[in-house]
Structure formats: C-alpha cells, structure tokens
Image (cartoon, grey):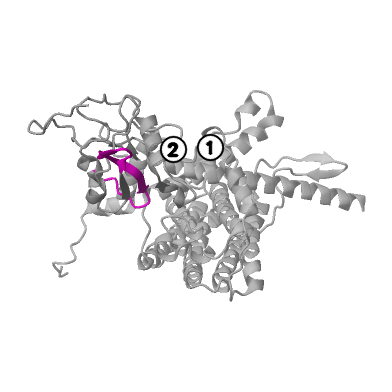
Amino acid sequence: MTEFGLRLAISLTQIAAVMGIVVITVLILTLAERKVLGWMQDRMGPMEVGPYGILQPFADAIKLFFKEDIIPAGANKFLFTTAPILCLIPAFIGFAVIPWGPNQTFEVGGITVRPFIISDINIGILYILAFASLGAYGIILGGWASNSKYSLLGGLRSAAQIISYELNVGLSIVGILILAGSLSLVKITDAQAGGFWHWYLFALPAPQIFAFVIYVISAVAETNRVPFDLPEAESELVAGFFTEYSGLRFAFFFLAEYANMVLVSCVAAALFLGGWNAPYPGTILALLGAPSLAWIENTMWFAVKTYSLLFLFFWLRATLPRLRYDQLMRFGWKVLLPIALGNIVVTSIAVFIYQQMK
Amino acid sequence: MESTTSTKRPSLSEWFKTITFYEILVGMKATLSHLLNYRPVTLQYPHEKRTLPDNYRGMLALLRYDDGTEKCVGCDLCEAACPSRVIRVVSAEVPGEPTKRYSKEYYMDMTRCLFCGMCVDACPVDALGMTREFEWAVYDKRQLHLNKQQLLAIGDRSFPTREKRLELQHPNVAFFNVAFKHVPQKSD
C-alpha cells in the first residue's frame, strides 16, 4: 500500500511538472507570437505591461479570468460548457507519452523512477493521434452548441479540415514506424541516438524529409494555424467556433490551441529530429566528466528543437496568407496524401533491401 | 500527346521550384530579413509624440491682444463661414459705447468641427487661432461644447505671445486691421 502511494505521489509530481511546463510554455508562446509577428512586420508588439511587455501574458490571463462568462440565448448549455473542456483535455493528455529526456533512472524508496518519461506506452504515437482526433469533437460541439451561424460554420470547417489532415499526419509517421519497428516514442527516440545523421529526418536507408515536410504542413493545418486557419478566419467567420465564447471558456480554447501547437512540435521533435538526442554523438557534459548531469544537455536539446518548430509556426503566420477552402482540401487530398503514400512505399522497399543486404 | 494552349507543361525548373516551395521560401526570407534588421516604425504614442507641422490645424481658440483685451469684435463672420455650424456668436454693443461691438457669448460645439480652418480665414481681426492641441478625447461629449471663457483659456495657454494692439484697432471697433484712409480717423 505504501508502495502504491509512493508510486501515485511520484506520478502526480511528474504530471504536475509537465502540466506546469506546458502551461508556462503556452504563456511564453502567447507573448512570443505577438512579439515575433510584430518584429517581422516592423512593429514592436506589446510594450506596455512590464519592461518590453514581458508581463503581457499575465495581464491577458487576469483579464480572461475576470471577464463575464456569457452563455448565448438558445445555446445548448451542457454542450456549450463541455466543449472547451473536451478541447483542452486531449491537448494536454498527449504529453503523457512524450520522452522529455534520457532514459536514466533513480531509486526512491525501492521504486525505480524514470524522471523524464511519465509513461512508456507501447502504442505511444497511436495514443497521441487518437486523442488529437478527439479534440475535433470539442471544436465541432462548441461550434454547434453556440447557436450561431459563424460558430457552426467554423466548427464544420474545422472538423473537415482536422479529419483531412489527421490522415496525412498518420501516414507521414508510418515511414518512421517502419524504420524504428516500434510505436513507442521512447524506443523511437532511443533509436535515433548518436548524431544528427541518425535522426530519421536524414537517416539511411530512407531519409524521411518528405514525410517531415508533410508532417509539418499537416500539423499546422491540424492546429488551425495560419495559413490553414479557416475555422477561425476572422474576415469571414468573426472568430469561427469560439465566436460566442468569452472569459474562462475562451481561455480554455485558447490554451488548447497553443497546447496542441506544443504537442505537435514535441512529437515532430521526437519522431524526426531525434528527440532529446544531441546532434552529435553522446553529450558534452558526459565528455567533461559529468555523465550524471547529461540530462540537462539532453532536455535542452529537446527544448531547442521544440521551440525552433514553434518559431516556424510564427514565421509561417507572418509570411503566408490564408488558403481558400477548396485549395485547402485539394492540397490535403490530392497533393499531400499521394506523397505520403509514396513515401511509405519507398521507405518499405528501402528498408527491405537494406535488411536483405545486411 | 496533344498540348492545349491553356495548360502549358511546366519546365524542369518550375517543377523544382514547386516541390521545394521556392516562392514560400522567398516570402519567408523577406519576413526573416525584417526580423533580423529590426527597425520598428512604431511611435509609442502616449510616451513619445511626433512633431506636428507648423500649419497643424488643431483645437480652435479665441485670442487676446497684449493688453488682455479680447480681439473678437462679434462680427459673426466665423459663424457664417463655418460649414458645420459649429460656432454660435451672440453679438452685443459695448455698454456705453454704441459704435463698438463685442461677442457677448461665443459657443463652439467641437463635436461637429471638422477643423477646416475657414473660421480662422474669415475672421477680420485674427481673433481665432488654431492650436496644436489634439488630445481632446472626453468621456462626456457635452464637455466638447465650449463657451467663450474656455476658448479664451485655450488661446491663453497655446499662444503666450500676443499681438500688439495698435491704436487704430480699438478692441471693440471693427476696423478690421486695415487702415481705411477714406474713413475719418478716430479721435478719442
């Protein structure tokens, strides 16, 4: 019983730590996005709250927290209340299987703890994809329950878009799964150790460059970001599926969107960019004689990769205009899907020949 | 294979540009160059203000001569010139001096003013001026209905150097800043 309690305490600590890191990252992202967008457009971004506007996320959070919570007339109250939660939970729950750092262990009271891996499910990547798809329910239910034409149209668009691009995300990952022979993110990351030429983006026998490009494009589309932000196209649909939401419920949708961005970036880093592995063999700290501190370097590399991908999101937003709806669908089904399928075929053949030659 | 005129077969370089997202990369290079050469055009307005041009047409004001007497002679020409009916003048004789007039009451409804400056042009004695004040946002729009005292106060704070009153221009006589040679000189 004490062992169970200890395990529970350790797990809850890990969960709290990861949730805290994700929420802090979202806070940083909301500021970073506005700042980066501003700099790219010769503006300054928020400058008023705190020095250079660095306290802006807290001001936003306080404002959202104290805003009036409006439920529109004719809205389905139950679904209207549930939808933001349905959107938020899938966005956060995916972080459970992300390996944040090396596979090292330490003992606490006779229990082996792996501090950087909350749970190593052997179907980790399927679990993330499944929960990411569930997020679409929150969006479409929120859009329907608001009793507003803009919300409904936004929700429908979002559902169609997420279903279309989920497929491409799934198919672009298949090549990695063939190469790694596992669905566990921990195993996939471990298999990429030893320098950037072992990352699946560049690894022989089948570099997954096309798959990476498809994954990034589909991830942008799946998180409803510019240039695929049709569900919340402000010039057409006011704000899309969260038009009628205000206060804390709106904050939930907002948080879910940014948490989804962090999640897809983490998955891309873990699958294609070697996760927490440094782009050179081993770690510098281990060479300097501190192998017990190597996890700092490894987690830093994971953060660098994730934040670079998040920067790419902002960069794309500053550069590209929004797609038309038919362009979006045609691009997803007629361009990305065939390339993803072709990538699977080529990867399978390459892996087969590689194994025959060995 | 028959090629129609509308669909031209893309050349090899066009294919290459398409699959490498060449155009998107060009756009992203543009945004990145703006990020790296960060020169914001923003003016942090309440903290720093731009220098206004000399002929800036801001808040209207009534002026005085250097001895403190009002310039306005109550001729109503500004009221006639105003296209938006901002100005209302109640003209009256100076008590005890039947030939001299002044504006007993002078109102400006600044909610309607479009800052065209026609009243300033129309004024024969240069009694109206346009200041460089523009921060006149108020919570109650009745505060923009200004009377003579308020307009004189604006003029006092915006034009500290006043015009010297010539002897010809008695404050309350409409000689209009011009020496009318055919008119007999005043003798007082």
Q: Main secondary structure of the magenta part?
A: strand
Q: Amino acid at mark 1?
A: Gly
Q: Position of residue B139 (x, y in %)?
A: 49, 49
Residue A143 in the figure: left or right of residue A89: left
What segment carries the magenta color? B93-117
Please name whichever residue, A11 or B96, is drawn nearer the observer in this view of the structure.
B96
Q: Which residue is mark 2?
A: A44
Would you say residue B97 sits in the magenta stretch?
yes
Please name whichever residue, A171 or B144, is drawn nearer the observer in this view of the structure.
B144
Q: Could one spot residue A299 in this view of the protein?
A: yes
Q: Position of residue A162 (x, y in %)?
A: 50, 65
Question: Tag 1, which secondary structure?
Answer: helix
Q: Are marks 2 and 1 in contact (CB under 8 Å)?
A: yes
Q: Chain of mark 1?
A: A
> Looking at the rendering, which quadrant does residue B173 occupy?
top left
From this viewpoint, which residue is outermost toward the right? A1
Residue occupying the point 28% across, 51% down: B16
Would you say residue A327 sits in the magenta stretch?
no
Please name whichever residue, A25 or A346, is drawn nearer the observer in this view of the structure.
A25
**On screen, residue B14 above or below A162:** above
Q: What numbered label is drawn on residue A53?
A: 1
